[in-house]
Image (cartoon, rainbow, N blue to C red):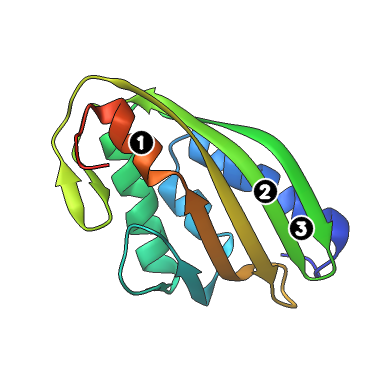
Amino acid sequence: MSASGTTDHRHVIEQWTASFNAHDAAGVAALYAEDACVVHPSYREPLLGRKPVQDDTRAYMIAMPDARCELVRVVVDGDCAAAEVVIAGVHAGPLVLATTAFPPTGRRLRFPLVLFCRFGPAGQVVEEHRYFDTAGILRQLGSTEH
């Protein structure tokens, strides 16, 4: 990857979206540094490293095999970028939210996801915080846990 810069950060987010839409979990993970730290609402501890990022991405692709990601906006500031995306797909496989696995419901899910990324000198994501509306997803799944 090229040296880090505003244009490069936007490009990495666009590549994240394209790789997700191609159902290329390895392609998504390749955008992260080997020692990346991802704070994710579905896990008690941060994901540490590229392999856990790839496994998490693959898990969402299994949960929603037709998942698509729409990039809504990207804001870049120095070595950081914030991205708002909308994920949509049919819940056809197990979905893990807040350490609870939900069996397939066949329901269509649509939810916003926000990524706050910090980039290292090589232009890869070194730190990321993800946010999404778990209660909204639970409502769409028909769960009474929210």
Q: Is residue 35 above or below residue 83?
A: below
Q: Is residue 130 left or right of residue 1?
A: left
Residue that carries the numbered disc 2 in the rendered image: 83
Q: Is residue 113 above or below residue 108?
A: below
Q: Residues within 10 Å of mark 1 (few under 14, many from 20)?
A: some
Residue 109, position in %: x, y? 37, 26
In front here: 125 or 23? 125
Mark found first going from the N terminus, 2 or 3: 3
Residue 19, position in %: x, y? 54, 41
Amino acid at the residue labelled 1:
Ile
Whole-angstrom CA distance, mark 1 to mark 2, is 19 Å
Residue that carries the numbered disc 1 in the rendered image: 137
Residue 110 seen in render: yes
Q: Is residue 68 left or right of residue 45?
A: right
* Disc 1 element: helix
In front here: 117 or 139? 139
The C terminus is located in which quarter? top left
Q: Residue at x 18, y 39 (%)?
A: 94
Residue that carries the numbered disc 3 in the rendered image: 9
Residue 66 seen in render: no
Mark found first going from the N terminus, 1 or 3: 3
Mark nearer the viewer, 1 or 2: 1
Amino acid at the residue labelled 3:
His
Asked whether the residues under the numbered discs 1 and 2 touch, taking CB atoms below 8 Å apart as contact, a structural biologist would say: no
Amino acid at the residue labelled 2:
Ala
